[in-house]
Amino acid sequence: MEKAALLKSIVENAIDGIITIDDKGMIESINPSGSKLFGYEMTDLKGKNIKMLMPEPDKANHDQYLQKYKTTRQAKIIGIGREVSGLKKNGEVFPFRLAVSEVQYEGRIIYAGFIHDLTKQKTVEDQLLVYTNKLELLVEDRTTELQSLIAQIRQAKEEVSLSLEKEKELNQMKSRFVSMASHEFRTPLSSIQLSASLIDKYSIEYNNPNIGKHVNKIKNAIGNLTTILNDFLSLERLETGIVKPNPAQLDLVKFAEEITEEMQMVAKQNQNIIYQHTGTQRIVDTDPNLLKNCIINLIANAIKYSGENTFIEFNTEIAANFFSVTIKDDGIGIPETEQKHLFQAFFRAHNTGSIPGTGLGLNIVDRYIKLMAGKIEFNSQENKGTTFTLIFDFQTT
């Protein structure tokens, strides 16, 4: 009795449904879990054909299947188990795992079915399938986008390569043209310069001031054109990366005095370049050619943009850990609103008027200074002059 009670308790409290039928398919018992699963009361099912819990086509075929099994003993579910569908009282069809055992009890055959609800599992599987399909579509879309992007990148790369190749060819052509123009123009300019000097010399005996006046115009025009050619050639050398700093020990004072003497020869009437040095040291490590180009450019601008009968201050200083070069004039100055463009190539302030120039000089100076790891500072007021200061943090010796 105790064993029977224990078995009954186990069946009634089992999580899965347990149902028994006779050899004709009539329900003999069903536990609470099974009744709840199908939505029936236990009294509603007892004595009813098990096929009432089956959807079509299993419902129509069940009696035939059961009879065939009893005749042939070839099982499709009994002793095997498989996934089938059940029909609830409310008409809902749900999946479950069915395992059927054949039991000999009191001289007759009883079939015991164990029902494990698969609804939650199938829901999860369906959701997983939906997510998988979405992910596959997303991956497919992303793959398509990626392939399209790769194709665009490849095309852009080809276009950039072609563009760079064309730009390289154009730069080479430009470089050859600038070099050729510079060298080809220098020869006739030298001839014109020499001829002008000879005319000036031979015209002395005629004592005609107009001859000297026009010869000076020729010389000035030659000087302007030479400056333009030098600017373009310097810019081209910078663009192509040819210019490299080559530091060497330099007597800064002697160097500055020579530049002062050279530039004084091209100064305007009664323009005086006043040179002064500060500090006890004279020797610095720097690139003399680049530094000279910078100083000459700045002094030439001071001469160009200042009037006659003026002073141009040229100062050098060597301190403990830097040296500097300062050029100051009292010329037309640079308008404050235009100072931010000062070092841009081809920039010229609006107040330069008819004064000749390319707008390249300060751009070249700025690039030379950067090559020498220095910096350039300036202060300017319109009609009150301009001061440029070049500062280099080189060690003195």
Image (tube, helix red, strand yellow):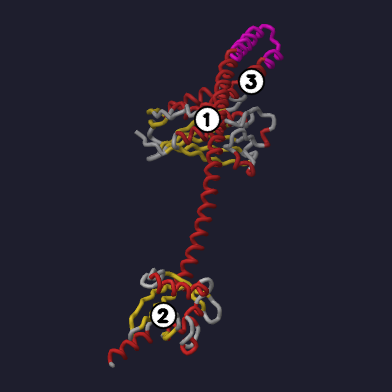
Q: Where is residue 354 in the image (x, y as percent from the top left)?
A: 69, 29
- Secondary structure of the residue carrying numbered label 1: helix
Percent x, y for residue 261?
51, 23
Q: How far apart are marks 3 and 2 (CA)?
A: 128 Å
How packed is label 1: few (under 14 Cα within 10 Å), some, or many (20 or more)?
A: few
Mark 1 and mark 2 lie on one chain; the one further toward the N terminus is 2
Whichever of callouts 3 and 2 sits on the residue coming sooner in the sequence is 2
Magenta span: 188-214
The quadrant of the picture occupied by the N terminus is bottom left
Q: Position of residue 274 (x, y in %)?
A: 52, 30
**Alpha carbon of mark 1 to alpha carbon of mark 3: how far?**
29 Å
Secondary structure under the numbered disc 2 in the rendered image: loop
Where is residue 330 shown, x and y percent of the image? Answer: 60, 36
Of residues 207 and 394, the one nearer the viewer is: 394
Q: Are marks 1 and 2 in contact (CB under 8 Å)?
A: no
The amino acid on which the numbered mark 1 sits, given as a three-letter code, is Glu
Disc 3 residue type (three-letter): Asn
- Residue 345 picture quarter: top right
Q: In which quarter of the image is the C terminus?
A: top left
- Asked if labels 3 and 1 touch by Cβ distance under 8 angstroms, the answer is no
Return the residue found at the far bottom.
1
Q: Which residue is tagged 3?
A: 220
Mark on residue 239?
1
Which residue carries the number 2 mark? Answer: 23
Residue drawn 54% across the image and 72% down it: 56
Among the two numbered marks 1 and 3 on one chain, the one whose residue lies closer to the N terminus: 3
Q: How crowded is mark 2: few (under 14 residues within 10 Å), some or many (20 or more)?
A: some
Predominant SS of the magenta segment: helix
